[in-house]
Amino acid sequence: MDSDTVLIVGGGAVAALLAARILLRRGGKGAAEQWVKGGFKAKMDRTEALSVLGLKEGPKLRSQLKDAHRQIMLANHPDRGGSPYIASKINEAKDFLDKQDKRR
């Protein structure tokens, strides 16, 4: 190998190590951090219902509820290989928010 190749390979290795060091120092924060740790609560509350459906409080919540429920159920429906338990929690979250919004 000539000296140019050694410098290029060595520089690439150093860059990869520095990138790994930065990621490790961040503590692995990233995509995995957006998931809620733990299981579902025994009784659904508003915060958990919003989290299950991936929604945020706001004036557009009522209009986004149906679309969010539909998208998540398409991805998690038991007839398409999804978990019946997860599907029931998704439906429970939608029903909970529907009932609460009708009271308001």
Image (cartoon, rainbow, N blue to C red):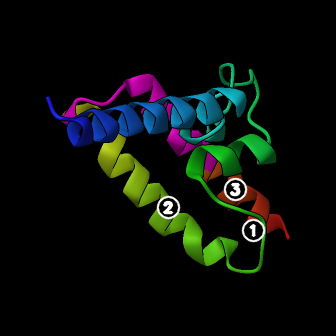
Closest to the observer: 62 or 28? 28
Q: Any mark on residue 68, and which?
A: 2
Residue drawn at (30%, 41%) of the image: 8
Left or right, residue 19 beside residue 10: right
Quadrant of the image occupied by residue 23: top right
> Mark 1, mark 2: which one is toward the viewer?
2
Q: Is mark 3 on a helix, strand or loop?
A: helix
Amino acid bearing label 1 = Lys
> Which of the two discs, 1 and 2, labels the residue nearer the N terminus?
2
Q: Name the residue under label 3.
A: 97
Task: Give the percent coordinates (x, y) of residue 92.
Answer: 59, 40
Q: What residue type is labelled 2?
A: Ala
Where residue 7 sits in the image (x, y, percent)? 33, 38
Q: Which mark is residue 102?
A: 1
Can residue 32 be seen by looking at this rendering? no
Closest to the camera, between mark 3 and mark 2, is: 2
